[in-house]
Amino acid sequence: MTRLAGLALTFVSVAVVGGCLRTTSYHCSSNADCSAGMCELNEFCSFVDPNCPSGRRFGELSAQFSNTCVGELPLVDAGVDSAAIDASPDAPPDAPPDAPPNCPGYITLAAVPGHRYKLFSSAASWQTRRDACAIEGGYLVVPDDATELAAVVNLAGGSSWVGVTDAAVEGTFATVLGAAATFLPWANNQPDDKPPGEDCVKAASSNLYSDERCSLSLRAVCECDLP
Ligand SMILES: [Ca+2]
Ligand SMILES: [Ca+2]
């Protein structure tokens, strides 16, 4: 909020069916509207944040994007879903109207209580799979320990992407959730950031990590917290 102090802000309050106040947001039309920030395509301001894979995080007044990393949620259709909400009388009244689907088709793994997972068995880039996970309400998997990693690798049936990257700060690996990565079982001589650069992390069938070019096509597992 303080970052935007001094600007002539226009606050937009959006009411939902039932009269509850859903959210307060600030829409920008150019970078000049965002103080030190940038006006993103969804008309919300973002600010530099090295903890985000994209290096930028949305401000507080960004409705469903508030405090999320740029790229964490799809920008398409942002803020234009009110009509769709009004046309869905069957929606549970307490459900956040802007929440993405709650990880449809995800499964639990016996070795890892507390989370659900989904395999994307077709190969794609790290960013493509990161975004696909986010659209479903999940995130590109972040194994917390060797047990979870082994379960994920088993589900993947081989090499797959994990939600860890040093794209924001070379050599500093962060998770797609914005936290510093704490579990990094590197293979020998990894990470090596092999030229022209490797910023995305692969889990191999050996249950060890290596940094790879993010454009490489691999399988991926999405993770979702239990409801
Ligand atoms: Ca790197
Ligand atoms: Ca490497």
Image (cartoon, rainbow, N blue to C red):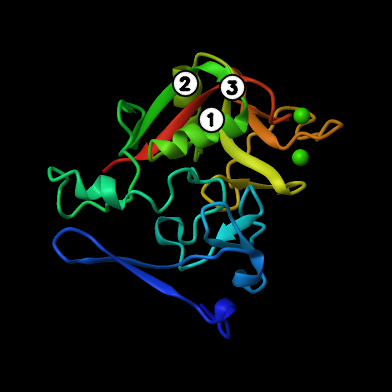
| Marks 1 and 2 close (CB-CB < 8 Å) | yes
Q: Residue at x 76, y 35 (%)?
A: 191
Q: Which residue is mark 1?
A: 129
What residue is pinned by disc 3?
Answer: 124
**Numbered disc 3: secondary structure:** strand
Give the spatial CA distance, label 2 vs label 3.
9 Å
- The front one of 127 and 188 is 127
| Amino acid at the residue labelled 1 | Arg
Residue 22: name its quadrant: bottom left
Identify the residue at horizontal 64%, vertical 20% (top origin).
217
Q: Is residue 225 left or right of residue 172?
A: left
Separation of marks 3 and 1 at Cα, in angstroms: 7 Å
What is the quadrant of residue 2 in the picture?
bottom right
Residue at the image point whose x is 12% and y is 42% from the top: 90
Horizontal relation, residue 201 to residue 110: left or right: right
Residue at the limit of the structure toward the bottom, as seen here: 6
Residue 46 at x, y = what percent? 59, 61
Percent across and percent down for residue 8 are 53, 82
Mark 2: secondary structure: strand
- Separation of disc 1 and disc 2 at Cα? 8 Å
Residue at the spot of label 2: 120
Q: Is residue 88 above or below residue 221?
A: below
Q: What amino acid does circle 2 point to?
A: Phe
Q: Earlier in the sequence, mark 3 or mark 1?
A: 3
**Label 2 Cα neighbours within 10 Å, binned few <14 / some 14-19 / many ≥20:** some
Per the rendering, the mark at residue 204 is: none
Which is more toward the observer, 22 or 114? 22
Q: Are marks 2 and 3 in contact (CB under 8 Å)?
A: yes
Report which quarter residue 224 is drawn in.
Answer: top left
